[in-house]
Amino acid sequence: MIDFYSDTKTRPSRAMREAMLDAPVGDEQKGEDPTTLALEEQVADLLGNEAAVFLPSGTMCNEIALRVWMKPGETLIGDRACHIITSEGGAPAALAGAMVHPIDTAEGIFDAEEVRRVITPGSRYASGTRLVCVEQTFNLKGGVVWPVEKLDAVAAAAHEAGLHTHMDGARLMNAVVASGIGAARHCAGYDSVWIDFTKGLGAPVGAVLAGSRAFIDEAWRLKQQMGGAMRQSGVVAAMCLYALDHNVERLAEDHELATELAQRLADLPRISAINTPQTNLVFLDIDETGPTADEVVDACFARGVQIGAFGPRRLRLVTHLDVQRSDLGPLKDALSAAMA
């Protein structure tokens, strides 16, 4: 099976697995796992923060941040298609008691004026706005990279209004490689931020949430409360460290492959739109005369190629370290047959 469904499908390489074998470990919950501590320190430094905490998933990073920054009944601002709203099982409401004020944008990027426009000051009748969330890169709008100037302006507007700021940095390192701008610069205006290791960086488990030391102290309490504390987590933290050392710069190869993929698929029949990839995500829209996205997915799967349906007539293709240029031909053949 050639798998373009997601960069979450990456599997740890042999070298990454070997790094795990030699990792010193201890009880992470007691602060005794040296490999996990080293990962947290390295990520905190990378992101320009005082401290960090290793967590099982990016969703837990987001939800812990919401719990720290918000009281039940308060409101967060984010794009309507952001991961926190669309892909976390209603966790903002279930876990943080948060209300959501979605902003509709073309690319997942809003500006400072839009933030100011939707802020509710709060009264006995209305929920007060407490948090602004951004997603870098923006998944469902095509892996779009927020310009740092807009990130800064949004954060400044939020802070001027007394709000906190949070960055979902699941693919932040893709943005770093695509822009040539360091990670700490991207998240300089954000009170909390995290990066994921299970997407383009190729590790099997884990994300790291960073912020001030006081923020991380409270995040640790919530990690314990939510069942996220681990024991000898160094066995997986070692693979994350390997990913930081070996798999960041190679993200450029995924971006180049996505660009080539989009160019190769541009002449497919019944494709009404295709994005110009900034990073590693390619979205195809199928016109009304063609099969549905689910039908195309099933037809491609029958031909040994896995892709994703993200709407009745939208497909997503993702490049990552487990797909190669030689896989583009079979992918196009499968799509051509499915469209016909």
Image: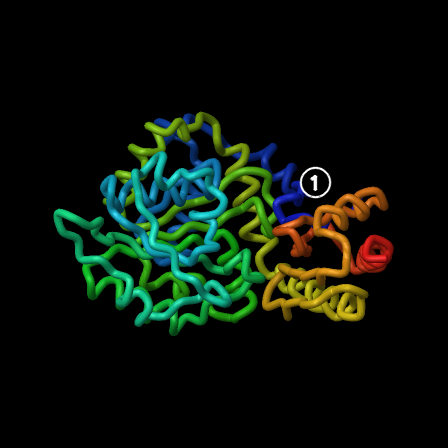
**Which residue is painted at 84% across and 59% down in the image?**
336
Q: Residue furthest left?
A: 124
Label 1, on which residue? 14
Q: Residue furthest front?
A: 289
Tag 1, which secondary structure? helix
In the image, is 271 to the left or to the right of 228?
Answer: right
**Which residue is painted at 54% across and 46% down in the image?**
197
> Is residue 318 visible in this depiction of the protein?
no
**Crowdedness near tag 1: few (<14), some (14–19) or many (≥20) residues, C-alpha within 10 Å:** few
Front residue of 189 and 76:
76
Question: Which quadrant holds the N terminus?
Answer: top right
- Number of residue marks: 1
> Is residue 249 visible in this depiction of the protein?
yes
Query: Taking 60 as reference, is 289 above or below it?
Result: below
**Which residue is painted at 24% across and 54% down in the image?**
129
Q: Amino acid at mark 1?
A: Arg
Residue 87 lies, in percent from the top left, at: 49, 44
Residue 122 lies, in percent from the top left, at: 17, 53
The part of the image, by quadrant, that contains residue 313 is: bottom right
Residue 31 lies, in percent from the top left, at: 35, 31
The part of the image, by quadrant, that contains residue 162 is: bottom left
Q: Residue furthest bottom?
A: 149
Residue 278 lies, in percent from the top left, at: 59, 68
Question: Which quadrant holds the C terminus?
Answer: bottom right
Front residue of 191 and 310:
310
The part of the image, by quadrant, that contains residue 53 is: top left
In the image, is 184 to the left or to the right of 191?
Answer: right
**Which residue is painted at 64% across and 49% down in the image?**
6
